[in-house]
């Protein structure tokens, strides 16, 4: 039985519409979460975008291991993918993104001129998994609240164009996610980074599985803990229920919240390749332990 599964109706509808909208776009901003740079690039996204020119924007770098983020950036560039690391909250990396977008827009304009067509604003689709920072980025680029944002997945429910001056039009889109999360290690990573709704799983079951995954993939996040358990987290945070007993549900929810928001420290759950190129296949997923 799957611990986590989430595919809301508005996302299913939007992914069908994206195929038609893609025909109108000149290039794509593909946003990936710095904590899961490989896991946030789904096959469904690759199939949708095909050979469309793209810029990979690595978001939420402040929540990831800095060395791993730079290694992933080198990987993308070795593979010939234009890429930039961005913190949409602080604006760090925004100048580099403007430069890349300007270069791509100039290529689009040159192609139109060569075909004898009048110049127009470049049309750019912004895509990525839910809660990866698409709307925050658009608001930064627009220098106003042009897109609705929220600290949970699924806030953007409609596809719409947002004009940036005379040279660019951005297409804000709901998050892209596979219709069925068959790979439960992938699903667990998405839950740990806030890409799926908290209503999609039982935190009492998911928190111990997340701790097991952290031990294997990002042990430094738990380096100061006496033992990698929800009970230890509750002890450190001073969480107790009535009568001094552990409130397991509250502890699990707070642990996952602290993990998602970086309170427990930076983490990267996808190891970068050693020498650039495509990342190696992940190790076989371990079956999540059963919990009463």
Image (cartoon, rainbow, N blue to C red):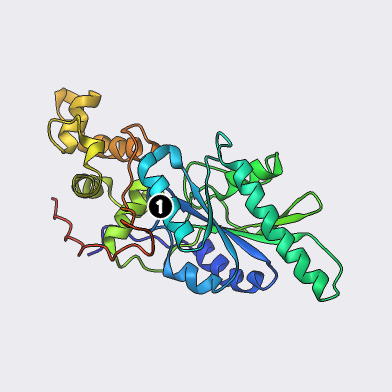
Taking the image as shown, residue 82 lies to the left or right of residue 270, namely right
Taking the image as shown, residue 252 lies to the left or right of residue 157, namely left
Q: Quadrant of residue 274?
A: bottom left
Quarter of the image with the N terminus is: bottom left
Where is 160 relative to 164, above or below? below
Frontmost residue, 201 versus 33:
33
Residue at the spot x=86%, y=75% of the render?
116
Frontmost residue, 184 versus 94:
94
**Residue 196 seen in the current view:** no
Where is 35 relative to 26, above or below? above
- Helix or strand or loop: what does disc 1 sit on? helix
Where is 54 relative to 269, above or below? below
Residue 131 horizontal/vertical position (percent): 48, 49
Residue 8 horizontal/vertical position (percent): 46, 61
Q: Residues within 10 Å of mark 1 (few under 14, many from 20)?
A: many
Where is 137 relative to 242, above or below? below
Residue 279 horizontal/vertical position (percent): 34, 62
Frontmost residue, 13 versus 119:
119
Residue at the spot x=37%, y=52% of the render?
36
**Residue at which label 1 appears:** 72
Residue 220 horizontal/vertical position (percent): 24, 38
């Amino acid at each position: 039985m799957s611990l986590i599964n989430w595919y809301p109706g508005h996302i299913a509808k939007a992914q069908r519409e994206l195929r038609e909208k893609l025909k109108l776009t000149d290039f794509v901003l593909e946003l990936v979460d710095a904590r899961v740079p490989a896991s946030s690039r789904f096959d469904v996204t690759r199939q949708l975008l095909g050979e469309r020119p793209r810029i990979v924007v690595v978001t939420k770098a402040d929540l990831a291991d800095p060395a791993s983020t730079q290694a992933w950036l080198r990987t993308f560039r070795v593979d010939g993918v234009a890429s930039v690391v961005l913190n949409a909250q602080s604006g760090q990396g925004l100048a580099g993104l403007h430069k890349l977008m300007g270069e791509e827009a100039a290529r689009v304009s040159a192609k139109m001129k060569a075909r004898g067509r009048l110049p127009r604003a470049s049309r750019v689709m912004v895509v990525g998994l839910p809660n990866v920072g698409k709307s925050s980025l658009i608001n930064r680029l627009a220098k106003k609240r042009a897109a609705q944002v929220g600290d949970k997945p699924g806030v953007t429910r409609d596809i719409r164009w947002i004009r940036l001056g005379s040279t660019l039009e951005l297409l804000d889109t709901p998050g892209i996610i596979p219709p069925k999360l068959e790979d439960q290690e992938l699903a667990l990573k998405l839950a740990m980074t806030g890409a799926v709704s908290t209503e999609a799983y039982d935190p009492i079951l998911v928190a111990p599985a997340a701790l097991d995954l952290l031990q294997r993939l990002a042990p430094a996040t738990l380096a100061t803990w006496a033992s990698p358990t929800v009970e230890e987290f509750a002890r450190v945070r001073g969480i107790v229920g009535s009568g001094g007993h552990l409130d397991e549900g509250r502890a699990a929810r707070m642990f996952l919240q602290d993990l998602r928001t970086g309170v427990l420290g930076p983490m990267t759950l996808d190891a970068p390749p050693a020498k650039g190129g495509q990342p190696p296949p992940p190790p076989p997923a371990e079956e999540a332990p059963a919990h009463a």
